[in-house]
Amino acid sequence: MKKYILVTLLLIIFFTVIIIAYWLYPVKKESLHEQKIYKTTENPPQIHDINRSLNFSSTSQQDIQINCQLTIKHQQFIINEQTKNCFEFFITQYGEKKIDQINQDFNAYIKQNYLNPAQSQILNLWNRYLQYRTQLPNMAPSSTSSNNQIQDFLAVFNNLQKIRKQFFSNNEIEGLFGEENTYYLYTLKRMEILADKHLSEQDKAKKLQDLFKNLPENWQENLEQLNKLEDLQQLTSDIKARGGSYEEIRQMRLNLVGSAATERLENLDVQRRDWNIKVNQYLLERDMIKKNHLKNVSRDKALQQLKEKYFISPNEQLRIETFEHIHDQGGTLPLLE
């Protein structure tokens, strides 16, 4: 009996040890595996759970993920536009945090997420970028296209390049500011074309279109609507100011935005012209009714009927009230050109 009890106890102890070993071994192995992946991955996750508790974001950034997608290949730090975005995410906390605190937070974030040699490379560039930003003067070039402002814009751009060369190599400048420089040079060339008095508006439109097509595709998507609208307004205004013909405007549009967009603009011209005619005719008849010696009730009814005759939709009726007020005050009507 004692022998049976002893054997039973030994079996229980044996299976208990097996079960404990089974449960403990995978946990330990998985933990080490996860740690290895996290520390050696080429592209660490944008945010790790511990980041939230360490409060790397400022108060105004609490609901924003840390924008720090640095590129690591073969344990080497690759400098690109995302590098600058990462640096600027921390720097924009200035005002809510002091520079020393920002620097401390960035160092903690990088040391937590990256191993050497990439870690040292990132922090080395960060230290120089922080010096660059603290010494960078407030230079905001104007986008207006007068000759003096073109020179001012060029001076700002050249000054920026000189300052950057004090802190970064040519490769680092290309990585950090390559896309920004593309925009600066495009804007400068665009200003020069618009200010060139030796070119007709049609020639300017053609050169602007050629300049635009030479931009990278991502820049074309960002700038297409904004700059082309500005160019259309500027060149149309120039043609009208010198008494140019509608055919000149049409040719300028064809050169700048193509036939499909030109057709849409011409349809818009018709709509604007019809609106202007309708507004002027309505206000003329409205003045005639107001000058008649009608009783208030009859006059108000006639005015309402006139408004409904010319402007059917509630939006148009609401819109014409602005014109009525300006007209009654003797102001210049904001008619569409």
Image (spheres, grey):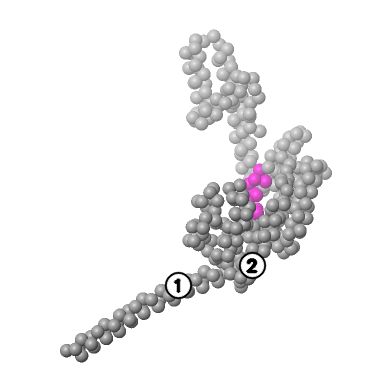
Q: Is residue 7 left or right of residue 189?
A: left
Q: In the image, what residue occupies the spot 33% across and 82% down?
A: 18
> Most extreme residue toward the bottom, as rendered?
3
Tell me, for residue 31, which label it has, or none.
1
Q: Is residue 251 visible?
A: no
Q: Is residue 272 left or right of residue 236?
A: left
Q: Amino acid at mark 2?
A: Ser
Q: Is residue 286 left or right of residue 138?
A: left
Tell me, for residue 120, which label it has, or none.
2
Q: In the image, what residue occupies the spot 70% across and 62% down?
A: 172
Tell me the magenta residue range: 218-229
Number of callouts: 2
- The relative height of residue 73 versus residue 141 in the rendered view (above or below) is below
Residue 247: quarter of image: top right
Q: Is residue 309 left or right of residue 210?
A: left
Image quadrant holding the C terminus, namely top right
Comes first in the chain, label 1 or label 2: 1
Q: In the image, what residue occupies the spot 77% across and 52% down?
A: 159
Q: Amino acid at mark 1?
A: Ser
Question: Where in the figure is residue 80, as x and y percent of width and height?
Answer: 65, 62
Nearest to the observer: residue 201 or residue 55: 55
